[in-house]
Image: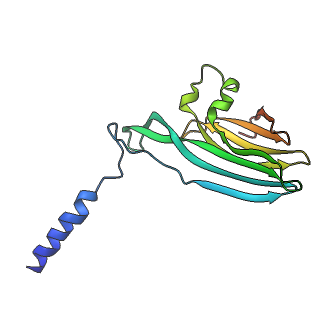
Amino acid sequence: MKKLLIWVIFLFFILPSHGKNKMNSSSTNIVCFPTIQQDTIIGNYFISYLIKDNDNIISRQGITSEGDTILLKCPDRSVILNLKRKDNGDTILSNKEINKYIFESLIPKEDDINQYQLWFFEIKNVDVDKVTFDLNICIPDTDICYFFNLCVSDDGNITITEIELNEEEE
């Protein structure tokens, strides 16, 4: 009787969960990423940002190590940026959403911006009158990326420049 009870428990709890994490072409699983929050004071600035998934879903085909074709799905990401001067309390940006579409004019037309994701965002440099951030836009699960500097001046003006990498940096 004990053996039967153990088998029933095994079949009820273990077998139904087997394979649930496998994704196939009909899967609706979406790979989500953890929210990242940064809140700091550097120089004369209060800087806080939140990197989070947004409602856009990026889908593309991939191949498993076994050679099976799968559908990869992951959410796009946005940065919610707040920037304030420490000395006079002036708010420079308040809950400014940074997403990949801000960079659309800098990405070649033959590259579909909808296949890219805002992936990396961090503080690069803090000057007397501006804060510069590094970020990249990538096709998920690849090394196909565009690299940018996003500079926010004290008047709230945002300047974006693409970073060209040479072969040694790639």
Residue drawn at x 71%, y 58% as measured from the top left: 39
Residue drawn at x 67%, y 39% as measured from the top left: 136
Residue drawn at x 23%, y 58% as measured from the top left: 16
**Does 123 appear above or below 141?**
below
Task: Say which quarter of the image contains residue 28.
Answer: top left
In the displayed structure image, the side of residue 164 where residue 140 appears, left or right: left
Q: Is any atom of residue 14 visible in this view?
A: yes
Residue drawn at x 49%, y 49% as measured from the top left: 32
- Between 31 and 65, which is closer to the camera in this rendering? 31
Q: Where does the N terminus fall, quadrant-wise?
A: bottom left
In the displayed structure image, the side of residue 122 where residue 141 appears, left or right: left
In the displayed structure image, the side of residue 70 where residue 129 appears, left or right: right
Q: Where does the C terminus fall, quadrant-wise?
A: top right
x and y percent of residue 130 in the render? 86, 44
x and y percent of residue 114 in the render? 54, 29
Task: Say which quarter of the image contains residue 133.
Answer: top right
x and y percent of residue 37 in the render? 64, 56
x and y percent of residue 110 in the render? 60, 19
